[in-house]
Image: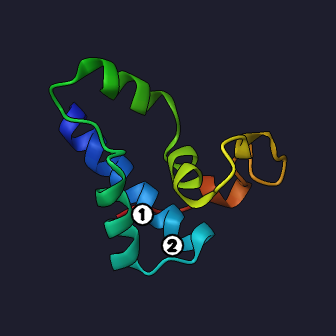
């Protein structure tokens, strides 16, 4: 999988997480990602590396939670088992 394909996969996974764990509608989830500036440019190797370092679930929670230390909450991190069972189309 090349970076463009992986980036699209992450984007779809983040959208699914926003829907499942944040209660967003699909269009609202897409808009949230687009407006966040979260998705790095394909030509920025450092940003891509940092982005791919975390799971899509992490980025979804980053967009959902108001608390910058959300990942210290054991109810939110590590990802729940059902996250790993999600199917991404």
Local secondary structure at mark 1 = helix
Where is residue 11? Give x, y as percent: 34, 53
User: Compared with residue 15, is residue 1 higher up or lower down, i.e. above or below?
Assistant: above
Q: In the image, 73: left or right of 86? A: right
Q: In the image, 5: left or right of 74? A: left
Q: Residue furthest right?
A: 74
Q: Which residue is mark 2?
A: 19
In which quadrant of the rendered view does residue 14 lie? bottom left
Where is residue 49? Give x, y as percent: 37, 22
At 72% from the left and 54% from the top, the residue drawn is 81
**Is mark 2 in CB contact (under 8 Å) with mark 1?**
yes
User: Compared with residue 57, is residue 43 higher up or lower down, i.e. above or below?
Assistant: above
Q: Local crowd at mark 2 within 10 Å, few (<14), some, or many (≥20)? A: some
Dividing the image into 4 quarters, which one contains the N terminus? top left
At 59% from the left and 53% from the top, the residue drawn is 61
In which quadrant of the rendered view does residue 58 lie? top right
Number of numbered discs present? 2
At 15% from the left and 26% from the top, the residue drawn is 43
Q: Which residue is mark 1?
A: 15
Give how far apart the Cα atoms at labels 2 and 1 are. Answer: 6 Å
**Which label sits on residue 46?**
none
Dividing the image into 4 quarters, which one contains the C terminus? bottom left
Q: Residue furthest bottom?
A: 25
Where is residue 33? Give x, y as percent: 36, 58
State the residue in front, 45 or 6.
45
Where is residue 63? Give x, y as percent: 52, 55
At 37% from the left and 53% from the top, the residue drawn is 36
Q: Residue furthest left?
A: 43
Q: Local crowd at mark 1 within 10 Å, few (<14), some, or many (≥20)? A: many
State the residue in front, 23 or 3.
23
Q: In the image, 6: left or right of 62? A: left
């Amino acid at each position: 999988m090349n970076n463009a394909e992986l980036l699209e996969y992450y984007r779809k996974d983040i959208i699914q997480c926003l829907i499942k764990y944040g209660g967003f509608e699909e269009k609202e989830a897409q808009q949230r990602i687009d407006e966040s500036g979260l998705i790095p440019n394909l030509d920025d190797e450092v940003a891509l590396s940092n982005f791919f370092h975390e799971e899509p679930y992490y980025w979804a929670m980053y967009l959902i939670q108001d608390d910058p230390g959300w990942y210290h909450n054991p109810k939110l991190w590590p990802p729940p088992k059902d996250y790993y069972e999600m199917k991404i189309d």
